[in-house]
Image (cartoon, rainbow, N blue to C red):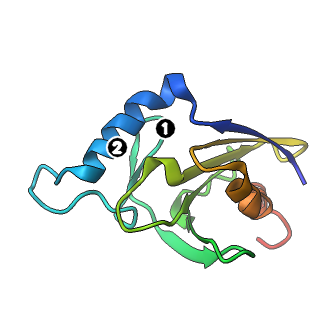
Amino acid sequence: MTSIRVLICVAAVMVFGVVSASTQQSKPSAAGDEPLRWRDGYVTWRHKLVKPNWQIFDAKDGTEFAVDMDHIDRKNHHVVFYSIGGDAFDPKNLIEFTFNCKDMGEVVSGVGTERVKLIEEQAEQMACGGPDQ
């Protein structure tokens, strides 16, 4: 298994994204509809709005996650997960993995390392084209 370097809340980069995304979460959209829901899309830490194709699954401990099947990037070894906790999009629940597929990986997320470890191996297999892919 790859050793993971976890970047919990990359402050300098994420501050704007967290503020703007959390504002969208609590206020209605410009069209006067409902707040942004995680099922409808997400904003990456790079401030990119993404329309996902979520596949929902439970981790070994029962924690519910979703993986964006349309944005698994095997060329750049990148995959995005979301730790489900309600309908509103919470940018802190987004988990972005990037691997070198040899000996290390990088994680950008606001969730604790315990949750990241629950899906680390599965994320690496998806990003690197492991045996189950």
**Residue 3 screen position, x and y as percent:** 87, 44
Identity of the residue furthest to the left in this view: 32
Type of amino acid at the residue the image marks with label 1 = Trp
Type of amino acid at the residue the image marks with label 2 = Ala
**Residue 97 screen position, x and y as percent:** 67, 48
Q: Nearer the viewer, residue 130 or 7?
A: 7
**Residue 59 screen position, x and y as percent:** 69, 73
Left or right for 5, reference 93: right
Tell me which residue sits at (59%, 51%) in the image.
95
Q: Is residue 67 above or below residue 92?
A: below
The residue at which mark 1 appears reads as 45
Q: Would you say the residues marked 2 and 1 are in contact, meaning their CB atoms lie under 8 Å apart? A: no
The residue at which mark 2 appears reads as 21
Tell me which residue sits at (29%, 52%) in the image.
25
Of labels 2 and 1, the one closer to you: 2
Element carrying mark 2: helix
Element carrying mark 1: loop
**Residue 83 screen position, x and y as percent:** 55, 62
Name the disc covering residue 23, or none: none
Tell me which residue sits at (29%, 57%) in the image.
36
Choose the circle earlier in sequence order: 2 or 1: 2
For disc 1, the neighbor class at 10 Å (few under 14, some 14 to 19, many from 20) is: many
Tell me which residue sits at (66%, 77%) in the image.
62
Q: Is residue 5 above or below residue 33?
A: above
Which image quarter is the C terminus in? Answer: bottom right
Which image quarter is the N terminus in? Answer: bottom right
Q: Is residue 118 above or below residue 22?
A: below
Separation (CA) of disc 2 from disc 1: 10 Å
